[in-house]
Amino acid sequence: MDTLTISGLSKTYGNGVQALRNVSLHIPVGMFGLLGPNGAGKSTLMRTVATLQEPDKGTIMLGETDVLRNKHQVRKSLGYLPQEFGVYPRVSAEVLLTHLAVLKGIINRKERTEVVKALLYKTNLYEKRKKNLGGYSGGMKQRFGIAQALLSNPKLLIVDEPTAGLDPAERNRFHNLLNELGKETIVILSTHIVEDVKELCTNMAIISNGKVLLTGNPLQAIEDVKGKVFRKIIQKSQLGTYKERYTIISERLFQGNPVIHIFSENDPGDGFKPIEADLSDVYFSQIFGQSTHVQKQY
């Protein structure tokens, strides 16, 4: 099966913002999580891979195909669900998907009818196929977005922040759909939601300020920080002092008081207790430690 290989990709916008800085990734068939904060460069990378913009330098290969030199060919085997996409609110899902199928080149009516029907079933929208898209929930619209992205039977599917704003039930339905698609397709899930990557992806990359900070298997990344994350409940008035003394990778409130997590190679003492780390600890340790670290691979 084809793999996606990104090598030395860089992009600087006209306003001087370096969106991508020498990004290199190897992405096999399956679910690949691209994790990073807003403004990290994830959307720029996804648009570039989706042939919607040019990098300043670097290469992208889908199997033996040079993506940047063969855009038209690549688009035939590419599905893309951007963070925001428009629908016609007064048109039904079935009618719009049929129209999009025509635009995709499925001109045989019988074949087109079968493809549309199959995709509506796959995305669990068949029972609501006659309903206008304006009446769809956020999750239903996202599933319709996947249906239109699958019209070309893609080798590569890119989804950008697909679960942001979804309720837990819709998020779970969307996860199940992506998990099924990832069995035979390269699926890149670009998100800032750590749990999405932990639950779905066998491979991932963490990106921030246009740089890849870490690549590899999420579970192996969690194992690597085992015994290096510590927790303590402090007073609000102490927070400034602790920020000066330690690299705090996350904080939240418990009964009104801050609970802080720090990353340390050794037991820091001072009342900190070791905890069982999760992917969010890996993520924040990379984001807040990026000024001093070298890219890690697992």
Image (cartoon, rainbow, N blue to C red):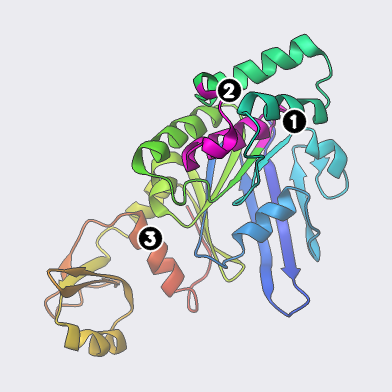
Q: Amino acid at mark 1?
A: Leu
Looking at the image, is mark 2 or mark 3 earlier in the sequence?
A: 2
Looking at the image, is mark 1 or mark 3 earlier in the sequence?
A: 1
Which residue is identified by label 2? 130
- Of residue 196 and residue 226, the one placed in the foreground of this image is 196
Looking at the rendered structure, the secondary structure element under dot 3 is helix
Q: Percent from the top left, x then y, of residue 244?
A: 30, 89
Residue at 73% in and 47% down: 50
For the question of whether residue 9 can be seen, the reply is yes
> Dot 1, crowdedness within 10 Å: few (<14), some or many (≥20)?
some
Per the rendered image, the range of residues in magenta is: 128-156
In front of the other: label 1 or label 3? 1
Query: Residues under labels 2 and 1: Cα distance?
Result: 16 Å
Q: Percent from the top left, x then y, of residue 248?
A: 31, 76
Which residue is identified by label 3? 282
Q: Is residue 111 above or below residue 49?
A: above
Which residue is identified by label 1? 100
